[in-house]
Amino acid sequence: MATVFPSQFAALEPFADWAVPTEKARYAKRIASTMDELDTFYNAAFPLLASGTEYLQNVFMEDISEEDKHLLWLFCALVTVAFSVEAWRQPKVPDTGAASIDAVVEPAV
Amino acid sequence: MAHFKKPEAGSWTAHLKIDTEPVSYEDSISPGHYELEREAIFRRTWLNVGRVEQLTKRGSYFTKELDAAGASVIVVRGMDDEVRAFHNVCRHRGNKLVWNDFPREETGGVCRQFTCKYHAWRYDLEGKLTFVQQEQEFFDLDKSQYGLKGVQTEVWEGFVFVNLDPENTTPLREYLGEFAKGIEGYPFHKMTQAHKYRAEIGANWKLFIDAFAEFYHAPILHAGQYVSDEARKIQKYGYEALHYDIDGPHSMVSSWGGIAPPHDRKMVKPIEGALRSGLFGPWEAPDIGVETADLPPAVNPTKDPRWGMDSFVFFPNFMLLIWRPNWVLTYHYWPTSYNTHLFEATCYFVPPENAFQRLQQELAVVSFKEYGLQDGNTLEATQSMLESRAVGEFPLNDQEVLLRHLHGTARQFVRDHQQRSSGAPAAP
């Protein structure tokens, strides 16, 4: 089976379903997840983000490869999930009831 | 304890010659007052409907629903490169000219002409009626008399404004006043990477402007966004702005904050430390061809080294935030009834060169959204309790001076309009 991410990030393959291309869908996946699922994803992905700065700085947005695109989307999902894990300790923003703020325009990648 | 110097008058409120009495929010809970605002404000002032980057080539267009003004407009770049706006109404039988699937939803694209879905009347990009189906069936129809109804359109620094009142001939730049003049030259055109958000908010439009025109709430409502030591420190510190100012109906607050990198890395969340970014944007600002110290004069007006961002309210509903790390956020509040509005927020960045920069921007955008969700839902709680009318007067502090100014301005527009329409002389 083809891998989704660049080889240095092979440890993320089990979390390939987090490589979601839009913020709206990433947020929807976050609030549809349990805290255990969010913690597991965060704990696997955060160290690779923290150690991956140099790699990511050398991924240029022009001509970005499919593997790097997936990696970027997964780390975008990590950004979304980090609020639940680091701040709220719950998937949703506290006290936000049925409120929603939806992305209507965002970059293609 | 004051951390920042106040004006000699002793308070910002006194300095700006605004009274300090408790305020009523009747103007935010009365359906009748909202109807007056629609007439006096939204049908009569310059409204920002977008940016020129949305109209990249000849024939690029978008529609904008202006519910509060009871109008829909088409904004289009013509074959002569001019940006124009028209009422989105076919001259034949009044059908909405440009829409897809849902008549009340906005749309956009690129076209050579506009064709009505109903009877195929066609208009060119300059609004001229060019084709009438079965023209011979009409009675002395002079096509030159049936072009699209134009709307005054002007562009300031790439922001496209329309004005639905043909009798309001004040040029846009004059209306926008001193703040706008002092912002001119800021390189908005370099910030073409846009993230736009929209939300339906169950509160009067002015109440959300209120929420973003004061940062007194930030250490409390958003406490959970900070690591706990930082939250305690910020709550103890409270909030004071660097500077407040008003110019006619418009206002601004200049704020400290977000100086990066933070003195103590333990004071930021792990994701912020890893990406070197946060609510105030990436810690490393992209090159925009101008240093912070050399920004146009209305930006960081006190030239304070602690400066973090400026937030301008261009009356009635356009808020422009300029952040120290060289990015821009705009807010628009489009009323849909006295107690609902459509909120739009757009983050504009210099396009990222690499994936790391892209992630730094994503963190700023998502931070805004998390804050915005807290603000938006709180507003519904405020609106419903104001409507209970259990309490009628509310004390506002000196850091909430711009709220007094906004509500006072909106009420003044209504009073002036009532005086004009009743033929009575305007108050001195």
Image: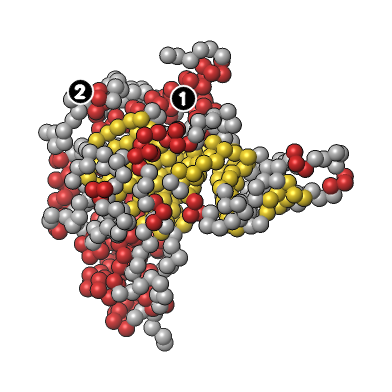
Q: Which residue is drawn at 15% across and 59% down?
A: B265
How far from the left and from the top, in percent, is residue B284? 25, 60
Q: How many marks?
A: 2
How far from the left and from the top, in percent, is residue B107? 58, 53
Q: Residue B129 carries which label?
A: none
The front one of B82 and B20 is: B82
Which of discs 2 and 1 lies nearer the camera? The answer is 2
- Does any portion of residue B93 appear in the rendered image? no
How far from the left and from the top, in percent, is residue B300? 26, 42
- Does any portion of residue A12 appear in the rendered image? yes
How far from the left and from the top, in percent, is residue A14? 34, 78
Label 2 neighbourhood size at 10 Å, few (<14), some (14-19), many (20+)?
Answer: few
Disc 1 marks a residue whose amino acid type is Phe
- Above or below, B53 against B20 in this view is below
The residue wearing badge 1 is B413
The front one of B17 and B126 is: B126
Q: In this view, does B212 lie to the left or right of B90?
A: left
Label 1 neighbourhood size at 10 Å, few (<14), some (14-19), many (20+)?
Answer: many
Disc 2 marks a residue whose amino acid type is Ala
The front one of B137 and B178 is: B178
Task: Return the residue found at the far top.
Answer: B424
Q: Residue at x 35, y 73 (%)?
A: A60
Q: Which mark is residue B9?
A: 2
What secondary structure is marked by label 1?
helix
Q: Residue at x 40, y 33 (%)?
A: B177
- Marks 2/1: CA–CA distance: 27 Å
Q: Which residue is drawn at 14% across and 45% down?
A: B233
The answer to which quarter of the image holds residue A86 is bottom left
User: Which label's residue is closer to the chain start, 2 or 1?
Assistant: 2
What secondary structure is marked by label 2?
loop
Q: Where, quadrant-wise, is the C terminus of chain B in this rendering?
A: top left
